[in-house]
Image (cartoon, rainbow, N blue to C red):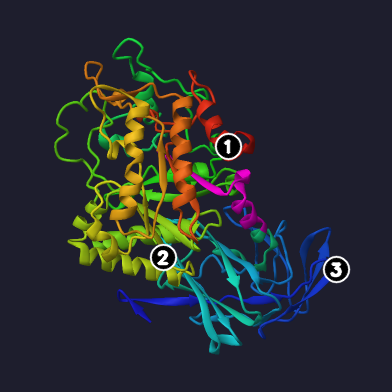
Amino acid sequence: MERNGMKKMMVQGIAGVLMAVCGTAQANLISNGSFDAGILTANEGRYEPVTGTGSKIAPWVCASGKAGLTTANGLWVKEGLNVGKHALYLQTFNYPADSYGASGDTSVWQAFDVSERGDYRLGFDYTGRPGMFGAETRLRLYKGEGTQGVKVWERTVTATTAAAFIRYEAFLEITEPGRYTLQFFQEQEAGFRMDKTIVIDEVVFVRDPLYSAVKAEQAGIAHSEYDVAAYVWPAYQPDPRWAELGIFKAGIGEWQNVKEAVPKWPGHNQPRVPAWGYENETDPQVMAKKIDAAVSHGVNVFIYDWYWYGGHPFLERAVHDGFLGASNNGKMRFFFMWANHHFNRICDNTVADKQPGRPIWLGWVDAEMFRAMSNRLIDMYFSRPNYYRIGGKPVFMIYEVGIFVQGLGGVENAAESLRRFREACERAGLGGIHLMACDYGLDPGHIAKLGIDSATMYNFIHWSGLKGLQEDYSDWAERSLARFDVAERSLGLKAYFAHASIGWDTNPRYPATCVMPTAVNATPVAFARILRRAKAWCDTHTPKGYPKLISINAWNEWIEGSYLEPDERFGMGYLETVRNLFMDKSTEK
């Protein structure tokens, strides 16, 4: 097989099958014909390796500290796995420090029996040395014996030369019991010499009652029939790319603007002081606290603003390191809104009042870049069990559909890129994609051609400009609520989701001498009236088969005066408003 003139080699893997029944003391390990059978014994809830004839178990620790084996003919089952009625594990393997792997062939795993339908988990960890080589790891599931069966699932994960460790985990739903075969193989670039051992130290295919519990928990988070989704502006972090903009040199991201804000008229609510302090949202412990606060108050979905400029993500560590690194992230679902607007100096509070000129980063992408971007989303996020889905499909929202179409060179090209995006999601076993649009400059003519499924607002300001420099929040918000009916009639969408904004005040982004229009008298009491109206519209306009989803701006748009997080003035007032409406049944009326 040739690719870019470089021959690839498949690294041989060895697989065994464990067919276990919950509660039994032992299970037989069936060899694939290359190695002798061994036995796994249950030991206080753990499954430990036991040597069989001709099989030597020798624990070894690689550079990342993960358990491995020095020989390819042993089996290692990690502690703490929730082993259900059926499980399949890849035997760990490695190679000598001066070689580059075995001859190119494919490991086909022994077929195994699935006696019941249900949710199954498949995952693997890949550990290698950064900069050593590129590799593709591919897994296929066949219904039947060997590769002659019907392929029902396929997944490919690519390790770049910069990757030291890759973890992949997916949940599968098997609706038809029977005999299945899981195939594993890996392609690597030829011609390298390793000076570190490669270890693939865990592949699990397990009947997973925990997954069913996770789904049940997700369905009932906050004991509500509603999905209350708050946008997250992930800028409160020391992202190194801020230096490209020449701003936020204090190293705390846009908290700097929040701290430097000044009141611009008597009684102006500035600066706004966060009750939790100016925390770094890439810190998992910080986000664990925020997840607990959100879920306990009825907010069960985060919509992360997600950025891609110049071929690279921006501000992604907030979700990747912070939210997904939090030990309790499984309590809450999340999805992405691709914030594909051009990025200028609007965050620079010394010059934002002047003409920003040409954007520093352009929001549009071409077809090749969109493919790279979407592959990253599929590989890293869409398969996660708490990624938000509608109709079983991961939800992906586009902020400015018009910019997306322009970047692809027209609506036909954009539709083709989205078609490929859906196909890639289907190949990954995701069932496709639910495409959501932000109701901001949305062209009704694009919706059917692009296959947009639904829409919601980001902030009321997109539809109701403020009258004068100071307008009462309630008047401004009431005008915006009328958009729901208009959008539902005019856009031709399958679903339109209600929205509630908490406020609007962007003065912290501008010099002290520049006064920007502001929604005044924005209080938790005023917000409660608007949120109640949005909830009532949701109750009567959600199509059958769709979730009762309500978006809120925002969890933390401190710089725009729209946030649920507690501050020194209102405390937990905004979060308590959500809890009262969506969790406390005694206060619904």
Along the line of sight, the residue nearer the viewer: 240 or 96? 240
Categorize mark 3 by other alpha carbons within 10 Å: few (<14), some (14-19), many (20+).
some
Please provide the residue range marked out in magenta.
Answer: 213-233
Above or below residue 341? Residue 9 is: below
Q: CA distance from mark 2 to mark 1?
A: 56 Å
Task: Please give the name of the residue rendered at 70% of the width and 59% of the height, measured from the top-left corner.
Answer: 81
Above or below residue 493? Residue 523 is: above
Which label sits on residue 588? 1
Q: Amino acid at mark 1?
A: Glu
Residue for badge 2: 134
Q: Position of residue 349 (x, y in %)?
A: 26, 24
Q: CA distance from mark 2 to mark 3?
A: 42 Å
Q: Amino acid at mark 3?
A: Ala
Q: Position of residue 199 (x, y in %)?
A: 57, 64
Task: Please give the name of the residue rendered at 48% of the width and 66% of the height, measured from the top-left corner.
Answer: 430
Categorize mark 2 by other alpha carbons within 10 Å: few (<14), some (14-19), many (20+).
some
